[in-house]
Amino acid sequence: MLNFEQPFRPHTVYGQNSIEQLADYIYGSKIMFVYGSGSIKHNGVYDQVINSLEDKDYIEFGGIGSNPKLSLIREAIKECKLNNVDQIIAVGGGSVIDAAKAIAIGAKSDTDIWDIYTQGHKIDSSIDLLSVVTNVATGSETNDVSVIVNDEINLKRSIKNIHAYPKVAIMDPNLTLSVNEYTTRYGIVDCFSHLLEQFFNNVNNSTIDKQLALYMREVIDLGPKLLNDLKNIELRDSHMYLSYVAYNCDIRNIVGGDFACHGLDYGLASVFNSTHGAGLAILTPNWMEYVANYKPAKIAYFGRLVFDIKEEDDTLAAKLATEELRGWLKSLNAAERYSDINVIIEEKQLLEMIEKSKVSYPLGNYYGLDEKAIREIYEMGN
């Protein structure tokens, strides 16, 4: 295993109707209520939050969309500083919570938030953040990762830092019952991707590998069932829990992971503002097919643990594992090609994607991708 410390984690309030306890965790003297583009105003969640804020001094900051924009985050940071905000409540999916983390960190710093995300500036503190998740996928409600997009230069980047952890997380599966099929589909893909990315680590730890494989098998079983029964609270509950364990960062702190597919999607989303889970659905099996040509052993191991592949030859087993992954994604009706998400990639855009995918270089830890490899994997999605 890697040497690791177990950092602070949110006080997590989990379960049906846990939203009713929200008021118990609102203690700021000046609060900022951060939310998305309006869906919570149609499903009753907004009213529940406002009722919990009764007699509190608060301001609202709405309009956070997918791939949260730096321009809005800077505006919210300015509002926090002007109003001396000392607690933020983020209500929404991963994008809203990621944005709120950036706001919480930026409001306690004199350094521009983009410089913090891209230049490695030290983060000393953050405003206390209470997360209320309404769309599960990223695990942002309980982890220390935040992803934002600089909409001036169209570049997606992230941080992983102890000060990005929320102080409190409320996880009520009832709040996800109104999430539509499209968003649910790619929440399932994102959940699976976090498990897969961590599985492809360079640490020999069969206990963690088998734990990750078990969770992946559960997501594989859950996915089609949930998409066929979106109002099933037990399935929603299972999805919420799996997303929580997939990426609260406990496992990543122990074994790390590859995360090339996330980097590849950073390139795609930076240029096209595409849905994260949809990008992962296209890119992940292509990454696996490519890497299987050079380093098949753990892909074969993945196939044996997750899909019960019996083939003993690693090269053949890795090929079968890739086919099984494609088959499962197809069962979800997930995107297979860029045309499925209305994206046409020409040479100029491809070059931009390659450059913007380089969150590290070579990209990925299990098998480092150079520019040639990145190009070939991108081209497989046409």
Image: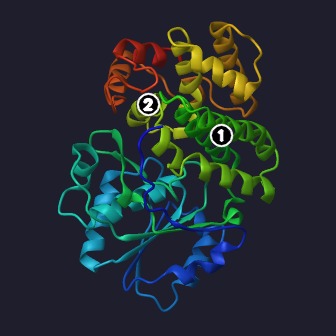
Q: Nearer the viewer, mark 2 or mark 1?
A: 1
Of 151 and 316, nearer the camera is: 316
Snapshot quadrant of residue 61: bottom left
**Residue 366 position (above or below residue 113):** above
- Residue 139, compared with residue 302, is above or below; it is below
Label 2 and label 1: CA atoms lie apart by 30 Å
Q: Tag on residue 211?
A: 1
Label 2, secondary structure: give it: helix
- Amino acid type at mark 1: Gln
Tell me, yes or no, whether the two marked residues, 2 and 1, touch with CB atoms within 8 Å.
no
- Quadrant of residue 326 within the rendered picture: top right
Give residue 317's position: percent from left, percent from top.
Answer: 68, 13
- Please name the residue shown 45% across and 84% down the image: 27
For label 2, the crowd category at 10 Å Cα-Cα, with few meaning under 14, some 14 to 19 and many 20 or more, is: many
Q: Residue at x 29, y 71 (%)?
A: 79
Q: Could you tell which of marks 2 and 1 lies nearer the N-terminus?
A: 1
Image x and y of residue 289, in percent = 57, 15
Q: Work out whether residue 326 can be spotted.
A: no
Q: Which mark is residue 268?
A: 2
Quadrant hosting residue 263: top left
The answer to whether residue 233 of the structure is visible from this angle is: yes
Q: Is 156 placed left or right of 196 in the picture?
A: left
Residue type at numbered disc 2: Leu
**Label 1 secondary element:** helix
- At 26% across and 58% down in the image, what residue appears? 123
259 lies above or below 34:
above
Q: How is the image coloured?
A: rainbow
Q: Residue furthest left?
A: 110
